[in-house]
Image (spheres, rainbow, N blue to C red):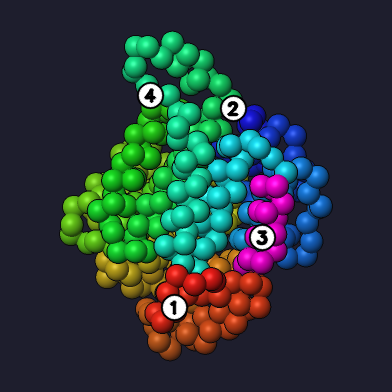
Amino acid sequence: MAVAAGPGGTGYSAAVPVLEVNSLLVDTAFGADPGRAATGLPVARTAPESWLRAVSLGGIGHYAAARVELRRARASTTDPVLRSLTHSLEGSLLRQLGWHARAAAADGRAAALVLPATPAVGRAEDVSNVTWLTSKANTARAEAVCDALTGLAADALGTARPGLAARLLHRCRTHLEQHLADPGTAWRQRIRLHWVSAETALCAPGAGLIALPEPIGPVPGVAHTPSTATDPALAHAETALALAENSPSVRHRVKSRLLVAAAGAAGGDLDRSRALATEVAGETAEFELLPLRWACAMLRAGIDPESGGAAEAFECERLLAFRGGRLRSASDTLGHP
């Protein structure tokens, strides 16, 4: 697995698990035009391109079509890193719909494919460690490990286990420090780590499970003012947003703003939260990001019952179900989404 630099023009490049892929697919999955998936994508020629199509389709809530692409990708490759990425994405799609226990099974499969081959830093007998650290193929593997661990942490939150989530996040953070120490790498994994850290702090306020984030190291082309928030949830959300603002991905920027709005609301800053949620609502509509539009509508309904958020959330649920994504309700068990 090689790592290709995608579009961006910022301090980061879009990490993709292949050297040559269709640039339109990269830009839709991790770039400036996620809404392109709503009007048509290039046909996938390879398993990595099927994965990129699945990422893009999942971002706009076309869950059934995304699952088809994931099956195609897995049927077309024996590469454990790419197969791990497909399972992590499957877990993400399930988690977006509230099926956290089923997502944990997918994320567990993702972890199993990449964790056993990860060498431990500092073992004297591991003479190939330096080669591993500088290998592009194993950089992709290290990123896949982080995807699996943050996915499992988010799954743990959804099954009311914030302590487990915090332990998994610590493991992910350690893995980043050991194997992806350059702050200019793994932008997506770093953003996701801060997302789930913020969510864990929101889930267990006052429990001391999540510390304030460490300052972001210097990244070429990235200007960053450290968060001054003393609340871990808001500090991690703001750090994720700072990283996302300098990433290629519109989708990551929008979700990060939504998380800052949620953390602000939980901390009592309703004015800022309301303003950010209104901004995010417009962006999710502009870029066809239906899953985030539903989440934003739910937040708006909670902040201001007169905002029309509840009606919009209901309409989003209807569209998501039409596209193959049934949201889990309180009466559901572990059945199929």
- Position of residue 129 measured from the top left corner of the image (x, y, whole percent): 45, 16
Left or right of residue 227: residue 103: right
- Disc number lying in front (1 or 3): 1
Q: Secondary structure at mark 3?
A: helix
- Position of residue 278 measured from the top left corner of the image (x, y, whole percent): 49, 73
- Disc number lying in front (4 or 2): 4
Would residue 65 be counted in the magenta stretch? yes
Q: CA distance from mark 4 to mark 1?
A: 41 Å
Cβ atoms at labels 4 and 2 below 8 Å apart: no
Task: Count neighbours of disc 3 (C-alpha within 10 A) and say few if under 14, some if 14 to 19, many if 20 or more.
Answer: many
To which residue does mark 1 refer? 332
Q: Secondary structure at mark 4?
A: loop
- State the count of labels: 4
Task: Count neighbours of disc 2 (C-alpha within 10 A) and say few if under 14, some if 14 to 19, many if 20 or more.
Answer: some
Q: What secondary structure is the stretch in magenta mostly built from?
A: helix
Q: CA distance from mark 3 to mark 4?
A: 35 Å
Query: In terms of depth relative to the viewer, which is nearer, 301 or 316?
Result: 316
| Amino acid type, label 4 | Ala
Left or right of residue 225: residue 29: right
On residue 137, the disc is: 2
The mark that comes first in sequence, 2 or 3, is 3
- Position of residue 294 measured from the top left corner of the image (x, y, whole percent): 52, 74
Q: Quadrant of residue 182?
A: top left
Would residue 274 be counted in the magenta stretch? no
Task: Count neighbours of disc 4 (C-alpha within 10 A) and say few if under 14, some if 14 to 19, many if 20 or more.
Answer: few
The relative height of residue 200 versus residue 316 in the rendered view (above or below) is above
On residue 186, the disc is: none
Q: Secondary structure at mark 1?
A: loop
The mark that comes first in sequence, 4 or 1, is 4
| Amino acid type, label 2 | Ala
| Stretch in magenta | 61-75
Q: What residue lies at 66% left-to-right and 37% top-to-bottom?
A: 78
